[in-house]
Each structure stands twice: as structure tokens, then as C-alpha cells.
Image: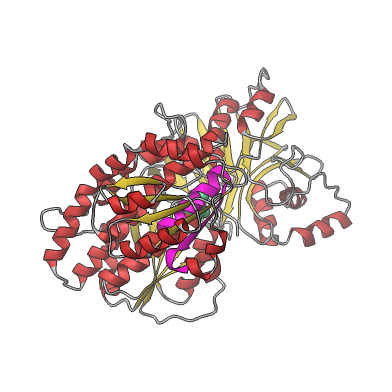
Amino acid sequence: MCGIIAYVGDQPAQPIILSGLRALEYRGYDSAGFVVRENGQWRRWRASGPVAALAAKMNGASIRSGCGLGHTRWATHGAPTEVNAHPHAGGQDEVMLVHNGIVENFSRLKKKLAMVGTVFVSETDTEVLAHLIALCYAGDLVSAVAEAMSRTEGPLGIAVMHRARPDEIVVARRGSPMLLGLTDRGRLAASDAAAFAGWTDQVIYLADNEIARLTADSHQVFDARSARVDKVVTTISPAETAAELNGFPHFMRKEIYEQAETAASAWRGRLDPVTGAVKLGGLLDCQERLKNCSELIIAACGTSYYAGLYGQYLLSESAGLDARAEIASEFRYCQRSYPAAAALLAISQSGETADTLAAVRLAQAQGLLSLGLVNVAGSTLARETAAGVYNHAGPEIGVASTKIFLSQLAIFNLLALFWRQLHGRDRAEDLAWAQALVGLPDKIRQVLALDNRIAAIAERFCHYPNWLFLGRHFNYPVALEGALKLKEVSYIHAEGYAAGEMKHGPIALVSPEVPTVAIAPADRLRAKMIGNIMEVKSRRGPVIAIITAGDEEIKELADEAIEIPPTLDWLYPLLAVIPGQLLAYHAACLLGRNVDRPRNLAKSVTVE
Ligand code: AGP
């Protein structure tokens, strides 16, 4: 949450920082700010609202300085007002600071600072840190940052300038991501490589508790004991920073449409369609431990957790693995000990979700093998887990996750096959499974071709304020995900339920004003879903059914039917999720919502 970009070099900082802020805006978009030091003065602009509001405010300003900081905020402490926007000043304006994270002991520190005469102008925790750095400064900004960090608690990624050192930026991380970008014409730092698009592909990932000093032609990295650290420079692929709409009106729509390719990329080079064999290079080194794994805890948040739930069903049923999905924010506080042969698989698109990382660290502290299923290469999760699998799905910019959910389901299929093969299970079954996977991208395209029909359904129902999503077994996570998507982008209230739970409460909600999306493909639970649909219909609730093409029986019962192609029972979720994504997308557009940047949300939840 919150995006940081900093630049020091021989080019004007303004265009570099603004383009970085636009790329980082998915991390938070309730206010933005920019500062440079020019002619012995700070020049700072801040605006409530998106980066466009900041850019409009700066319009016409002639800024030549090649050293500055930018920030896009997702508010934690204090309303999204201009005065709470970063950069924050510290001391007597000696320091300017941008921050991503939370100063957990800020109220204690604030009291102490107030006692020595510090006057606070904002409601933020960040301002406390700015004052603390100013107070700790004795000629060396790196030491001041190290000292201030040692007095604060909580995750942070920061970039700081001091007026005595106008051509130097110091950045640091503890928990929140921070990486450096190297160019011939200066140094960059940002919370995400996306901010470097168009400027550099040469990056250095800072590790926790590292601090870096940047000047136009140098960078030095120090560890927590102030010792110099030699860092590896990584070349990132253009795909890791690409964020183009390519003619689509929104990233969410573009990413929904990318899903046939997303599925194919999940198994490209990993699944042999002729033999059904699966090779997962990222798990090679721990195959023995995986073979003897007694239980698999799958930890994740939000959409990634729903994918984990699917993984729980799939791995336990088809690979005989004792798998259990856990909400990471709950798991991290669960005081249970696990057998040494257990493993934890953390799932995260961003690889920066604070609760998911905490779950990993908890598992590691107990000596468990930690695995990651992550999309962002080089993210904290990718670096902290012992082994893992990448989604290879390209950047997901829309705040509402779409293609990554599908990719996570696809990869669970590979993991299930992998585990089966590790234990010498029946290859003939695997072959049929592998072939069904290979045929899936075409079927995904067929579902995407229903877009106009789904848009018409969204138009019919988008003014209904409450919806239900029902599914069973493999499609239960799809029901949860459908409801989450609708909530996130259209702000329509929706509940996802295991259809069998209907009679235990949610049926009280059914009425002609509450549409129910019933995920009822022709799998082994179809008849049970028909029962649920009948129950809704007999209470005059409108039903939008997601069915297998040609299922005339359900078509007659439902008010609207969305027909998806036939596939294996456990592959239906990879098709059935798409109508829910499109319903949410169209409803949001029809209601005039900000589809890619829904209110109150951020793409990467780096605070607890
Ligand atoms: C999904 O649309 C979300 N915005 C959100 O639930 C997300 O899946 C969750 O925050 C986890 O993120 P991660 O996959 O990056 O860890």
C-alpha cells in the first residue's frame, strides 16, 4: 500500500516521478505528493485525490531539479486530505520523507516528541518518523535513518531527503518493498519495478533492514549494522513493468480478456501434453521434503485465499495430500504447533501482502518448509520462501484480481499432477487431465465470447442492491470470488455461499429483489444445485445460472443462463469464474464506478 518513487540524476525529476506515480497508483490513490529541492528551497506539491489531481496542480510549474521524491497514498492514519498527503516535513523542515507502512508505536513517539516542542501539522504516523529522522541527524542521513528505524516499530519503506544534502536520497526498507533502479543518468528507488518502466530494467532489491544512499552516479547499500553490502543487479523483463491498456478501456477488462493466455502460460514448459508429466523447476530442490510432506497449509488473503480453498479441495482429493486453506490474517495469530514434516504454501499475486508474509515467517520459525505461489518476480514472498512456483501471468494492474485467480487455479492443477507423480500415481488418468488442461484456453475464449450477453444481464440486474452467489465444492470458491468481485468494483452488496448452507440462514434474504447467481455446471453436484435453484425460484428470487452449454433443464428454471463449455468437474471453476468477473465489470461500468481503482482499496496490502 502506498507507492514511493525517488530519483536523483542529471535529468529533471518531475517527469520521471510523475510517470512512476502513475504506474504505482494501483497501490493507493487517495492523495499524492511530490517534492524537490531547488535553489535552496523545498518545492512541494500535494493533492487529495489521484495522481492526475497532483499533475494538474503542478501544471505549468517549471521544475529543473534532478532530485526528488513522489508518493501516492492509501490512508491508514488520517483522512485522505492534502495536509495528510506525503511528503511530510520533519524538524524545522530539514527533512522530507515519503513512507509506505505503519509506525506502530507512533502515539508513544508523538507524545515524546511533543514534550521536546515538536509541533505536528498532520494526523499521520509518518510525520512522527520525519521528525525523528530530523532529530537523529548529525551530519549523516544514513545513520539518522538507521537510528530512527531502531526507535520505531512496524513495517516501513521510506525515501528521505535532507536540506543539507540536496543531491542525495536515502531509502530503506523493513517489511515494505523497496528496490533501486540504475540508469546512466541517475538512480531511482521505488516500491515496485512498475515505476521504472521506460527508465531502466536494471534493479537491485533491498532486503529487510537495508538502507541505501543514492546520488546521481552512485549507490551504496548498508545492512542493519551499517556495514556495506554488495548487491546483485538483476535485469527485469519488460513484461514485469509493462502496464499498457492496448486499446482496452480498463485494465480489469484487459486482464479478463488475457485469461486464455494466462492459463496457457501457467503450464507452458511445465506440462508435457503427450505424457502428462509435470516439471516444476522451482520445486526441484525440495522434492524429497515434498514427497514426505505430512500436511500442507495454504495461507493467503482475499482472492488468493479463495484460490487456496480450491487448492485444498483439489490437492486433498486428487493427490491424497492433507491440505488446508487458511486466511493468513487469522493463521498468523493461531497458536498451534505443526509437525516438522508439514509445509506452508503462501499464495499472493503481489508477493507483498503483510499477513501472508507473516504466515510464512511463522511457519519458518517452526521449521516448516515454506513455498510460494506468486506472480511478482523478485517480490518479498518470492525471495523469502524456500521454493515455489511463479504464475508467469504478467503484471496485474486492475485492483480487482481477475487473471491471477484463474492462473492460481491453473497452477493448483499442475501442483496436483506434480504431487501425484511424486507418489507414482496412475499416469493414464494424468494424461486425460493434462489434455483437458491444454484444451482449456480455447474454452476460455468461448466464455469470453459471451461478453455481450453477460453485459445485458448486468444491465438488467445492476440496480438490485443485494446479490447472492451460490456454488458447491470446487465451485464454492468461485461463488465467494464472484461475490467479492461484484462488491469490490460495483459496490453492490453480495454474499458468496456454499449452496448447501442456504437453508441455514441466507435463504431468508431471497426475494424478487435479490438476484442469485447459481454456479451449476454439469458436474457431480448438478442435481444438488438444481435443488438450490428451485428453492430460490419458489421464493420468487431471480436466478442467473452458470451452466454447461445445452443444459435445457436448468435453462428453463433460470431467469438468465450463461452457458459455458463442458470440461472436467474440477476444471469448471476456471471457466465459471469468468461470467462473474464480467458481470462485476459491466455492473461497475453501468453504475459509473472507477473500475480499476475502486474506493478504499489498494492492490497490494502491505500493512496489517
Ligand atoms: C482481489 O480482487 C483483491 N483486491 C484482494 O482480495 C487480494 O486478492 C488480496 O489482497 C491478496 O492479495 P495478494 O494476492 O497480492 O496477496
Residue 575 pos. (x, y %): 32, 49
State the colouring used for the structure image.
secondary structure
Numbered label tally: 0
Residue 539 horizontal side relative to residue 347, left or right: right
Residue 118 horizontal side relative to residue 310, left or right: right
Residue 206 visible from this viewpoint? no
Residue 90 pos. (x, y %): 76, 45
Queried whether the magenta region covers residue 240, the answer comes back as: no
**Image vertical order of residue 45 relative to residue 160, above or below:** above
* Rendered residue at 26%/69% (across/down): 318
* Rendered residue at 56%/54% (across/down): 606
In the figure, residue 8 lies in which quadrant?
top right
Residue 215 pos. (x, y %): 57, 37
Q: Which image quarter holds the C terminus?
A: bottom right
Residue 262 pos. (x, y %): 32, 45
Q: Nearer the viewer, residue 523 or 424?
A: 523
Queried whether the magenta region covers residue 499, the answer comes back as: yes
Q: Nearer the viewer, residue 167 or 270?
A: 270
Residue 291 visible from this viewpoint? yes
> What range of the chain is rendered magenta?
478-501
* Rendered residue at 45%/43% (across/down): 583
Q: Considering the whole magenta stretch, tell me its main secondary structure.
A: helix
In the figure, residue 257 lies in which quadrant?
top left
Q: Nearer the viewer, residue 507 or 451?
A: 507
**Image vertical order of residue 10 relative to residue 105, above or below:** above
Residue 455 horizontal side relative to residue 495, left or right: left
